[in-house]
Image (cartoon, helix red, strand yellow):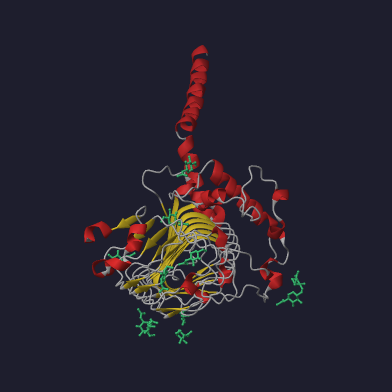
């Protein structure tokens, strides 16, 4: 009796102990397994998509989700893409079409999103309120195409560190409204066929009743923002994320919805983010670095390559190099009146500059026209560039500089004139440039041929750093 009782009690203890043991040994992996499955199941992934695990990363770490989809033709809101944050989201349909439906990627957070498809169609609000490190749209070997829904605010409220577009034929000019209310740090188009923008700042939208803003979307966005700034869980690897730019230039864009605030009080949202009729308004876009290389095959540069809705006071650099630009039309930079950064137009075939080509660049800091075919420059070209600090005219065909040429460049500090076939320089050409501290004249034939009688201007530059001059005596 005693023994039996003891035995059963012992068995009971043993039994409970083994249950406890099981629970104690495996709880984390059971939970992780459930979590992992839940993440991919919640997405209700289409058959063509596969969740990939990252080597060395715990399976429970949902922010490392990598997803690769092949031969998928349409992405809709049926799959709740924004449920998990992604490390990588790749869509590979190189021989076929892919359409991203309205709001399909709304609120998505991803370090990289890549498309390699033949024809990509992006609908209105496809990336609404998204937060993406790099969005790459590229095609191998041949050109892919990129199509935006007419008047679609494709990137509305979205923050992207880098949009990278390579080997893409845009087919026609695109509407600037795709960037409405977006914040992009670098926008690069490379080796593509790009036809500029249609620049319709105020658009009467055809679909006004379908896009009433959901206030929660903005709340969510602020929450992501909050997570980003404090815990940096979804920080991109880039050291130059858009958030840092915002802090640096906080003053001027304090009315944007991207203003960070440590508490998530929605009462602090500025009015424009809760406008009911939001699709009727083409809100400004913030783009810090705008680069188009080897992609413009029209000879005349016009204002159509510069969207009218960019907040240019927030832009640091605009580069259109290695294109086929031959002529810069009058007022080509008419929308850039508040642009204070550097404008780089090197390695084109620029020959003809309208006298009013640069007329609107009142605040421009640096201008590079190096490696073009410019022959004639006059004071009118530079008349309004009164803030210009650094002017690079190297590797051109300039032969003549008169007393007048640079007379309006009151703030000029650095002037590159090297590798021009200079034949004639007036004696007072630099006299009134009181801030000039560096002139670069390497490879200027003039230095060998100059008549000593007219060369006294060189000695007036004694306090300047004049490259190469000393070697040519
Ligand atoms: C793919 O897009 C092209 C260009 O819009 C169109 O002509 C073609 O019919 C589309 N193909 C399919 C299978 O939808
Ligand atoms: C847009 O809204 C106005 C006013 O509510 C309405 O009259 C108009 O029909 C709407 N447009 C469309 C395309 O529904
Ligand atoms: C991913 O999330 C885990 C928590 O689940 C966190 O500890 C980790 O730092 C995150 N990793 C990255 C790279 O953000
Ligand atoms: C949208 O804005 C227009 C112009 O301000 C107005 O006439 C229209 O009634 C508004 N529509 C809605 C749905 O609020
Ligand atoms: C540029 O356009 C011309 C005429 O449209 C065409 O012949 C040439 O091949 C194009 N060049 C490039 C690099 O696309
Ligand atoms: C391009 O510029 C040239 C020279 O100024 C001009 O004759 C021509 O009409 C311009 N073409 C276009 C399409 O603007
Ligand atoms: C202009 O160039 C100078 C040096 O040449 C550089 O220090 C400055 O940062 C540049 N300004 C801008 C806005 O890029
Ligand atoms: C201009 O071209 C020359 C010779 O091809 C090259 O050495 C130089 O780096 C180029 N300069 C710029 C600013 O691209
Ligand atoms: C530059 O000026 C000279 C003399 O006025 C003229 O012959 C030449 O055609 C001009 N070059 C360009 C590209 O306008
Ligand atoms: C330099 O400035 C003085 C005083 O404003 C003016 O008289 C003179 O014409 C200017 N010289 C040049 C070459 O612009
Ligand atoms: C340039 O200015 C100097 C000094 O005022 C003057 O001697 C010279 O004649 C001027 N050159 C021309 C071409 O007007």
Q: Is residue 226 left or right of residue 162?
A: right
* Towards the viewer: 252 or 338: 338
In the image, residue 34 sits, relative to residue 451, either above or below, namely above
* Residue 219: x %, y % from top left: 66, 52
Say which quarter of the image contains residue 420.
bottom left
Is residue 342 at least partly visible in the picture? yes
Seen at 46% across and 79% down, the residue is 171
In screen coordinates, is 127 left or right of 138? right
Which quadrant of the figure has residue 284?
bottom right
Q: Residue furthest top?
A: 2
| Residue furthest to the front | 453
The x and y percentages for residue 150 are 58, 76
Is residue 444 visible in this depiction of the protein? no
Residue at image coords 45%, 67% = 406
Q: How many marks?
A: 0
Point out the quarter of the image occupied by ligand 7. Answer: bottom left
* Nearer the observer, 122 or 473: 473
Q: Quadrant of the C terminus?
A: bottom left
Q: Where residue 381 appears, x then y in whole percent?
A: 48, 73
How far from the left and from the top, in percent, is residue 305? Answer: 50, 73
Classify 370 as above or below 183: below
Q: Nearer the viewer, residue 329 or 189?
A: 329
């Amino acid at each position: 009796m005693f023994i039996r009782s003891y035995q059963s009690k012992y068995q009971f203890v043993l039994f409970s102990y083994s249950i406890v043991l099981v629970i104690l040994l495996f709880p984390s992996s059971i939970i992780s397994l459930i979590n992992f499955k839940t993440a991919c199941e919640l997405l209700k992934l289409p058959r063509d998509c596969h969740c990939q695990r990252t080597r060395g990363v715990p399976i429970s770490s949902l922010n490392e989700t990598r997803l690769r989809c092949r031969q998928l033709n349409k992405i809709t809101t049926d799959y709740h893409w924004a449920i998990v944050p992604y490390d990588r989201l790749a869509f590979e349909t190189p021989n076929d079409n892919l359409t991203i439906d309205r709001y399909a990627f709304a609120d998505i957070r991803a370090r990289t999103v890549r498309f390699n498809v033949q024809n990509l169609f992006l609908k209105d609000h496809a990336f609404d309120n998204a937060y993406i490190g790099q969005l790459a749209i590229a095609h191998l070997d041949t050109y892919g195409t990129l199509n935006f829904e007419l008047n679609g605010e494709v990137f509305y409220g979205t923050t992207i560190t880098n949009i990278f577009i390579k080997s893409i034929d845009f087919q026609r000019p695109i509407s600037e409204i795709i960037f409405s209310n977006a914040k992009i740090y670098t926008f690069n188009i490379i080796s593509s066929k790009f036809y500029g923008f249609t620049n319709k700042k105020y658009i009467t939208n055809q679909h006004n009743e379908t896009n009433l803003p959901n206030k929660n979307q903005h709340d969510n966005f602020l929450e992501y923002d909050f997570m980003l700034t404090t815990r940096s869980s979804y920080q991109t690897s880039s050291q130059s994320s858009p958030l840092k730019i915002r802090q640096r230039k906080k003053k001027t864009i304090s009315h944007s919805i991207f203003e960070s605030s440590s508490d998530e009080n929605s009462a602090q949202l500025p009015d424009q983010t809760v406008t009911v009729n939001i699709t009727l308004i083409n809100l400004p876009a913030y783009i810090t670095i705008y680069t188009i290389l080897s992609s413009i095959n029209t000879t005349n540069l016009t204002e159509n390559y510069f969207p009218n809705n960019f907040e240019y006071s927030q832009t640091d650099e605009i580069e259109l190099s290695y294109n086929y630009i031959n002529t810069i039309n009058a007022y080509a930079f008419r929308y850039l009146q508040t642009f204070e950064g550097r404008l780089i137009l090197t390695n084109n075939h620029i020959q003809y500059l309208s006298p009013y080509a640069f007329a609107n660049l009142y605040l421009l800091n640096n201008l590079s026209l190096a490696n073009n075919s410019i022959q004639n420059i006059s004071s009118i070209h530079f008349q309004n560039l009164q803030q210009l600090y650094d002017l690079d005219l190297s590797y051109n065909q300039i032969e003549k500089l008169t007393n007048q040429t640079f007379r309006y460049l009151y703030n000029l500090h650095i002037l590159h004139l090297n590798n021009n076939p200079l034949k004639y320089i007036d004696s007072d050409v630099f006299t009134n440039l009181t801030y000039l501290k560096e002139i670069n004249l390497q490879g200027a034939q003039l230095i060998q041929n100059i008549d000593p009688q007219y060369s006294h201007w060189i000695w007036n530059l004694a306090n300047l750093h004049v490259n190469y001059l000393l070697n040519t005596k």
